[in-house]
Amino acid sequence: MNIDRRRTKKAFPWRRSLWIASLLTPALVVMVLFVLWPLLSAFRLAFYEFNGLQPTGFIGFENFRKVLFEQPYSDWTFNALKHNIIAFIALMVFENGTAFLLAYALLKALPGHRIHQVIVFLPVVLSAVIVGFLWLGNENTALGSILFANIWHWLGFPTLVLLAGMQRVSKEVIEAARLDGAGDYVLMTRIIWPLIAPSVTIVTILTFIGSFNWFEIPYVMAGLTGSPGGATDVLGLYFYRTAFGSTTTGIQDFGQGSALAVMMFIIVAGVTAIALRYLRRREIEL
């Protein structure tokens, strides 16, 4: 029986290949239509001048020059970029730092820790519209309020990722450290932290990508213009209103919007590649 099956596999290898291709084709078509094609279109359209949504002529790097060096566009670009960087730093420190402490607390398997895992993750499944629907009017606190809402909303995700990494640490290693007199601080910083480097890599990369693709909560809480006074503006909002216009600014330039989209892609892809290379090396060294 086993010999007949082997002969059948050898005689008809194309059937297996055809079956795999039939499973991959739908996903590949979706990726090409909704990811690759829009991406390539944005790259091409970034080099054209537009009249409404119709390209009128090739202008080279003029759209990039405007959004980077011509006022007021350059001011808006760097203001939004600054807020994305602040968001990434704040999320790394407060969201992921809190997630690490929560994950360690859940690792101790105290009474009721199962229900606590559900409670921690529950806000992640809520809609961003529900989380962010409130009014903000103070320039000094607006961005902080949005960050706080985002931290509360997504705290459960890095918590469970880090917890999964901690649960892979050998119990014998933890017990040996305890026998040597290691307290919680030493255990977290000297034992667990180095051993969960792959989980930290995942959380760091996803936090960076998420902070530079930030759109839903800033849009719901502060509006398309990043009000008040641009204090909550980020690249996602700036790109959207530049490409498609807004009722307050009255500006619509699909070419400049495409240039902003290309810049966002280059920033995210470039920094992610460099960070992955560094963090993977750190995993090996640790």
Image (cartoon, rainbow, N blue to C red):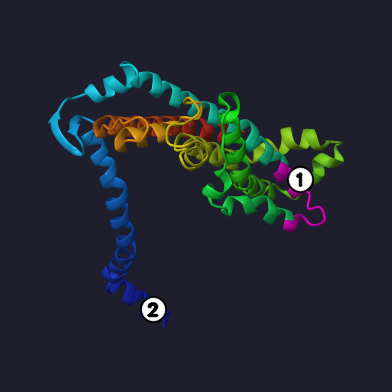
Q: Which residue is mark 1?
A: 105
Secondary structure of residue under mark 2: helix
Locate the N terminus by quadrant.
bottom left
Q: Which residue is mark 2?
A: 3
Q: Is residue 186 left or right of residue 156?
A: right
Q: Estimate the x, y position of residue 89 in percent, counting from the top left.
A: 57, 28
Q: Estimate the x, y position of residue 90 in percent, counting from the top left.
A: 59, 30
Under mark 2, the amino acid is Ile
Q: Residue at x 74, y 37 (%)?
A: 188
Q: How many marks?
A: 2
Q: Residue at x 33, y 73 (%)?
A: 9
**In the current view of this chain or complex, which residue is farthest to the bottom?**
1
Above-or-below relation of 264 to 22: above
**Quarter residue 7 falls in:** bottom left
Q: Is residue 158 visible?
A: no
Q: Estimate the x, y position of residue 231 in percent, counting from the top left.
A: 51, 26
Residue 247: assigned label = none
Secondary structure of residue under mark 1: helix
**Quarter residue 282 falls in:** top right
What's the magenta region? 102-115
Q: Is residue 202 left or right of residue 250?
A: right
Locate the C terminus by quadrant.
top right
